[in-house]
Each structure stands twice: as C-alpha cells, then as structure tokens.
Image (spheres, rainbow, N blue to C red):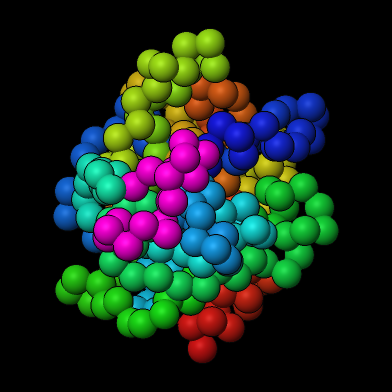
Amino acid sequence: MTRIAIAFAALLAAAVMALPAAAITDGELDGNGHPYVGLMVAQTAEGAPLWRCSGTLLSATVYLTVGHCTEAPAAHIEIFFSAGPVTTDPHYTSIAAGGTGCGNVAVTGYPCHGDVGGTPNTHPDFYDGPFYLHDAGVVVLDEAHPAPGGVYGVLPAEDALDSLKPRRSTTFTAVGYGLQKSFPDAAGWKDEAQRTRMLARPHLIQINRGIVGDFSLLLSNNANTGGTCFGDSGGPNFLGSSNVVAGITSFAVNYTCGGTGGVFRTDRANVLDWVNSFLD
C-alpha cells in the first residue's frame, strides 16, 4: 500500500498500531519458486492507478488477496506475474504530474496493463469493523490465466491453524512484492522498493490470544527470519514449505515493518465459505 493509504490506518486492540501492510524484508529472491503469486494494481473505474498489493492464484480465474486491497474506490485490477523487477512503462506519467495516466494508449505495461485483469470483490463484513477483522479480497479474472505447471495456492481446512504452537519451528513462507526496507517519513528517500517477488521464512509468535484474537496470526519480522512490509499486503503466507495459504499479509505494527507482522487467517469458516463461493 502507499504511504497515503497508510495514513488512514486504524488502531488495533491494546492501542497497537495496525497499518495495512504490505514487502518482504531481509528475504531472498523467489525467482520461479512461486509463479502463481502476482503483483496487483488497483484502478478506479476511469483507469487511474490507486495502490499495489500482492496475491495468489487459487485457480486459473480466482486470485486471493486482502480486503483493503480490493476495497472502494477500486473498480478494476491488473495483475503482473513476472518475478521482477516490474518496472514502470516509460510512457506512463501520472495525472498528478500532468500526464494522462493509463489514458495514454502508448502505455502497455506497469501500472496500467498486466498479464491479466479482473474484478475486485471484498469480504461482505469488511466494512463492518476495523479492516483487519475481515481482511479478505478476491479478484475474479476477466479470462483464465493458468499457472505454470498447474500448481496453485490451496486453502487450509477449517480451523486447521488452531493446532499450531508459537515456536521457532512453526514456520511459514511469506511471498510478496513489497518494500525491501522501510524508513520513517523523514528518511523515506532511503526506502528500498523494487517490485520484485521475494520470500521470507518467518515463524509464529502469537495465535488465538493477545492482539490477534482468533482472526489473525503474528509472525516474526527480523533479520534472521525476514518478514513482510508495505506492498506485501495480500501476499500469501504458506504453511511451512507447502502451497497451503495459511494466511494473507494484512498489517504491520510500525512504519519500519520491524519486529512482527500481522497475517489474516484463511482457515475460519466465514472466510472459507466466501472464497470457495468463487471457486465453486
């Protein structure tokens, strides 16, 4: 998410800041490891780019992300599956800078035209409370985009994560296109923001208690395990080294993405029922 979007973030329980999250920090290049994970750009009905996030193909036509990446005024999504860096089309100039944005027919790449487009859908309960309580979104693709090798992300069984224990051996594989490093606004010029698919291997810090309740996970985010940051929102957190999307990157607890990262759980019945309605 952009820093403008971050400014509208809510407060999590116990007065902990919950910032829509978003890139992999202290991670490694993913290369072709997860070609079914893509970079998405939300656009208005007029085609103006809004923000970028990450997400996972669950089928050739269904892409899973978070609700704060599909919420209004997003009306259309463009998705890029390159391992990156995904560079801005040289013909693109933002409307704010006096250009025509995606209205320029010469623009054929980022941020206007990806490998496939689609329609955003946000969890029906998303707007009823703080964003992190029902932070699920789905993009239904305009046309089928089969993943290489036919491998996709898969959803966990209902309440499957309840058996997990917070320990270093309970690991995840976080994948996304977010910032590699984030600094406070005064030093924001030092941010490292290549749009490259990267991965980290955080471990479980908190589940079913504390600030995450029964709807999220708190994972490590440090130099040893890596973690997620702004731009990784919606990206998958696979259980171990599997392709099971245990959760989707949802929030950060500070502006430098250090310490821990919040992941919205995909194993709750209301989430599974809603996402599976698109797969069915």
Q: Is residue 165 visible?
A: no
Q: Is residue 29 magenta?
A: no
Going by the picture, which residue comes out furthest to the bottom? 280
Q: Which residue is drawn at 30% across and 35% down?
A: 194
Question: Residue 136 location in percent, x, y?
Answer: 60, 61
> Where 193 falls versus 150 (above or below)?
above
Position of residue 96 measured from the top left corner of the image (x, y, whole percent)? 52, 39
Q: Position of residue 202 (x, y in %)?
A: 41, 37
Q: Is residue 43 left or right of residue 34?
A: right
In the rendered structure, the answer to whether residue 121 lies left or right of residue 150 reads right
Question: Image quarter for residue 23?
Answer: top left
Residue 260 vs residue 101, the one in the foreground: 101
- For the image, the number of numbered tags is 0
The image quarter containing residue 88 is top left
Residue 19 in picture, x, y percent from top left: 63, 35
Above or below, comparing residue 66 to residue 99 in the picture:
below
Q: Is residue 155 above or below residue 194?
A: below
Residue found at x 38% / y 43%: 93
In the rendered structure, does residue 104 fall within the stretch colored magenta?
A: yes
Q: Residue furthest top?
A: 186
**Between 54 and 151, the one nearer to me in the picture:** 54
Q: Is residue 15 above or below residue 228?
A: above
Q: Is residue 113 at all visible to an observer of this figure?
A: yes
- Residue beneath the point at 37% across and 52% down: 111
Residues in magenta? 92-108
> Mainly helix, strand or loop, the magenta region?
loop
